[in-house]
Image (spheres, coloured by chain):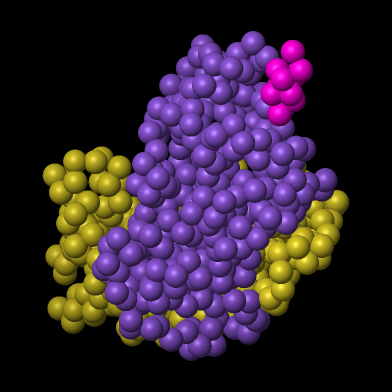
Chain colours: A purple, B yellow
Amino acid sequence: MASLPKRITKSSLKSFLDSFDNVLTDCDGVLWTGDDVIGKANTTLNHLQKLGKKVFLVTNNSTKSREDYVLKCEKLGFEIPSKEHIVSSGYVLAEYLRQQNFKKKVYVVGTPGMCKELENVGVSCFHVGGEQTEGNVLNMIADIKLDPEVGAVAVGFDPHFCFPKIMRAGSYLNNPECLFLATNTDERFPVANGPLVFPGTGCLVRCVETVAERPPIIMGKPSPKMFSVISEKNNLLPSRTLMIGDRSNTDILFGKNCGLHTLVVLSGVTSMSDLETWAASTDTEKHRLLADYYLEEIGDLLSLLNADKAE
Amino acid sequence: MASLPKRITKSSLKSFLDSFDNVLTDCDGVLWTGDDVIGKANTTLNHLQKLGKKVFLVTNNSTKSREDYVLKCEKLGFEIPSKEHIVSSGYVLAEYLRQQNFKKKVYVVGTPGMCKELENVGVSCFHVGGEQTEGNVLNMIADIKLDPEVGAVAVGFDPHFCFPKIMRAGSYLNNPECLFLATNTDERFPVANGPLVFPGTGCLVRCVETVAERPPIIMGKPSPKMFSVISEKNNLLPSRTLMIGDRSNTDILFGKNCGLHTLVVLSGVTSMSDLETWAASTDTEKHRLLADYYLEEIGDLLSLLNADKAE
């Protein structure tokens, strides 16, 4: 039996706040759901910055460019100083290729936002948007022309994912020299107030890795690549950094993989019953999913801070 | 080091032929590639039947109904007595639901041929063909209406596989009562004379199982379900049955799982270097991929038979 995360209380608040200078936080499920702010997430994050904490948004979502994120933050009342405070899996992917001095072309199974990040670092890429999937398979084969300049396939979230894209990706990856990169392996997202389940990038990645018969290099959480990109530019000490997230198998594991303090919020994927199951498990891998602290939602921090101030 | 399959020779031919009464054979890669007969596969299979062997076609391909297969066989010169001699993964799936006395509706990620098999046994189903995958994700969510009568999701080969289908499948499967069935897990197919790789049903199955967060029940080879369907109706003795296939991880493993004699032909997926790698491996699971016999192609059996006759 491993220990459950500790709930932050009025009495533990000061030592908690004193333990870090930097906050890394996930977005979907912590700060917002779609275009709706979760509780007082915006005021809370702004307040943490007023207390002198450096805040960075760390997201596996690759659909938007960092510029798009800055705009979204402004719209939703989050005061983020600049795009340097945003690390998306699409940006990490672009940084990775830049560091490798990659000179060929990338076939992107993803969105224009992902391409924009690649173009920002001077990497050529192309993606195919929505396409008509009618017609028979033999016509499909005839229509697919491979570009000999492609040297990497990058898979991110793509709402226009379809059979011809799997075929293009698999055909490029049949060349063992062709790099295979993926933004993340998040399996699914709950859709607010409905019976629908929203497939995550992980579904698309598993599909392409099956035809490729090899696994991709993963850029997003829980891979520590996202931390190395920020910490290199901002000189962050892991022991003085807190990671906040709602999905334990990505966010919290990422925090543990990087040696950060961890806080799980129950406003997204992970529930209290998940935490109890993992704590009771004999599998030590499950114990690694247990954060140091928990709160129902990030705004609870603000309530505690105000409560603290009022005394 | 395990033993490599033995090549059938003029001198071993008689004891080989005497060892079985029934022949189960895979189709793609053994009998044909697309619409082209492989060598003298048709004459060979017809000859085996003249020798008194009962022949059954056993295929993981779910795109055609058994009636379609009979027509294809006629066109390509294979004399197959009736559709009772054809066992496709789509047919096994339908038989499985019939045996379960399934009364709800099936959401099919697959082809009209798969639906036809279900309708043949009185199971209601529906599938969505090609669809336009343009437009944004929120419109996509709005367009998806779940049918409350659906009690099973069946995944087979589907050239119109796309994001909305993954979402529908994942949403139905979010109900733990909803059955999850798949025709097969074949990963990929080589495309003749070209650089393209053709994704197999396995890619689509991995994708849907990722969003479903649970594995499907697999109907096709190497699952022994396909053998139980034929042997029940035809009273086949495993020890008097030969399985011929080109893909060791499905066909040959299927033969082993059912206690059949096995013959691998090198006219499709498995190559001699695969056989050598598996024989040299210390992993005993790899040894299970090694057939009893091998031939370059099924037509070589005819050459041996004629050579035999000429003596």
User: Where residue B230 sits: x, y (%)?
Assistant: 55, 55
* Depicted B178 relative to depicted A307: above or below: below
Q: Is residue B130 left or right of residue A18?
A: right
Q: Quadrant of the C terminus of chain A?
A: top right
Instruction: Indicate yes or no whether the magenta region holds residue B237.
Output: no
Q: Quadrant of residue B20?
A: bottom left
Residue depicted at x 72% and y 20%? A309
Q: Position of residue A233 (x, y in %)?
A: 37, 49
Instruction: Give the extent of the magenta segment.
Output: A302-311
Q: Main secondary structure of the magenta part?
A: helix
Answer with left or right where residue B173 lies relative to residue B84.
right
Q: Residue at x 50, y 14 (%)?
A: A2
Can residue B164 be seen here?
A: yes
Could you say which quadrant of the image residue B167 lies in? bottom right
Residue at point 28% right, 62% down? A100
The question of residue A309 being in magenta is answered with: yes
